[in-house]
Image (tube, rainbow, N blue to C red):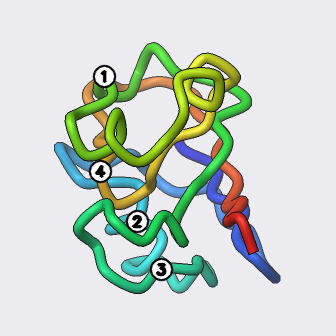
Amino acid sequence: MIELIGRSNRKIVAAEGQFTILDLAIKHDVQWAFSCTQGTCARCRCFVSEGMSFLSEPNDEELDRLEPEEIEAGYRLACQTKVKAEGHVVVKNEPYF
């Protein structure tokens, strides 16, 4: 299960296949900030407080856009981060602005 904490609502949903966090938020009507879906705007930046091991490793887009300290602290781009295994994940949308 993945708990998606959006700007004004939250939902606990099944982690489906190789969907990104942003895909799941959109599918389940969780209000999530985003603009580009390509990893360049970083509006979909999120904080993973639980379950990082169930998610994909940071890809090139994330490594280019986020600072190493952000990634180390648990920040990811929801449009790039995919669910890779079943497990409990908690993710909160935390854009820069």
Whichever of labels 1 and 3 marks the residue nearer the N terminus, that label is: 3
Q: Secondary structure at mark 2?
A: helix
Q: Secondary structure at mark 4?
A: loop
The CA span between labels 2 and 3 is 8 Å
Whichever of labels 2 and 3 marks the residue nearer the N terminus, that label is: 2
Of discs 2 and 1, which sits in the foreground?
1
Whichever of labels 4 and 2 marks the residue nearer the N terminus, that label is: 2
Q: Which residue is mark 2?
A: 22
**Dividing the image into 4 quarters, which one contains the C terminus?**
bottom right
The CA span between labels 1 and 3 is 20 Å
Q: Badges 1 and 3: C-beta atoms under 8 Å apart? A: no
Q: Which residue is mark 1?
A: 57
Whichever of labels 3 and 4 marks the residue nearer the N terminus, that label is: 3
The CA span between labels 4 and 2 is 8 Å
Q: Residues within 10 Å of mark 2 (few under 14, many from 20)?
A: many
Residue drawn at (26%, 28%) of the image: 84
Q: Badges 2 and 3: C-beta atoms under 8 Å apart? A: yes
